[in-house]
Amino acid sequence: MFKLPSPCMRWLLLVGSSLLISCTHRLPELEEIQEIREELQKNLRNYGPKSNNFMNSALRLVRAEAAFVRKYPNHREVPRFLLEMAQIEATYFGDVRRAVELLRQIDERFRQRSPIAPQALFYEAFLYETMLADTGTARMRYEAFLRYYPQHELASDARRSLEYLGQPPAEILQRFRP
């Protein structure tokens, strides 16, 4: 014979099921971001990265992701959105300083808690080295990367970057010539 659960058990079932429903609920903002991302890829293929269509889509994506980050600051997608925003800012909008700010947020808020954090810290160091020509800060960020993520797949690249940091490209190439 089926017995009705106690009031406490009913409450737990109700709370548990509402948590399950809220966890599986798809946010409309995520769907919009995905649609814009698909539009961006289509515009990249059809028109190229310098076209107005592509740049407008990129701007829409950055704005949508920034709004999401403000609205849901602890959502699991936030580090990925911040990284994507940083890549767009540096690569297509030429705002490397803004990209570094976004990457720093990932490091400060999600270090050791997100699989995106190591990539973001490495990318930050790379931007300081290559785009901002700030070898001192690049060195500090590469060293921080190695301190926090010594076993990460990018660790050997960070060590190599530190080894060649500040050397002219011709000098680096000379090391590899027979």
Image: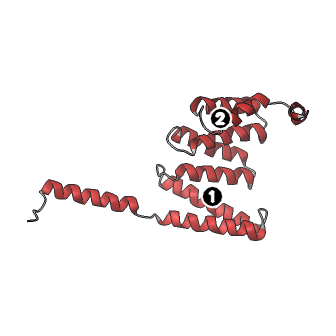
Q: Which residue is mark 2?
A: 155
Find residue 131 and report its image quarter.
Answer: top right
Mark 2 is surrounded, within 10 Å at the Cα level, by few (under 14), some (14 to 19) or many (20 or more) other residues, namely many
Vertical arrangement, residue 90 with respect to residue 2, above or below: above
Front label number (2 vs 1): 2
Nearer-N-terminus badge (2/1): 1
**Chosen colour scheme:** secondary structure
Where is residue 161? Give x, y as percent.
Answer: 74, 33
Mark 1 is surrounded, within 10 Å at the Cα level, by few (under 14), some (14 to 19) or many (20 or more) other residues, namely many
Q: Who is closer to the viewer here, 158 or 175?
A: 175
Q: Who is closer to the viewer here, 8 or 74?
A: 8
Q: Which residue is mark 1?
A: 62
Q: Tag count in the figure?
A: 2
Find residue 125 and report its image quarter.
Answer: top right
Q: Who is closer to the viewer here, 144 or 4?
A: 4
Residue at 67% in and 47% down: 99
* Label at residue 123: none
What amino acid is found at the position of numbered circle 1 in the picture?
Val
Find residue 138 and report its image quarter.
Answer: top right
Vertical arrangement, residue 54 with respect to residue 123, above or below: below
What amino acid is found at the position of numbered circle 2 in the picture?
Ala
In this image, 135 relative to 153: left or right?
right
Where is residue 36? Give x, y as percent.
Answer: 61, 66
Residue at 84% in and 30% down: 167
The C terminus lies in which quarter of the figure? Answer: top right
Residue at 62% in and 61% down: 61
Where is residue 55? Give x, y as percent.
Answer: 72, 63
Q: Considering the numbered disc 2 on the image, is that residue within a helix, a strand or a loop?
A: helix
In this image, 49 relative to 22: left or right?
right
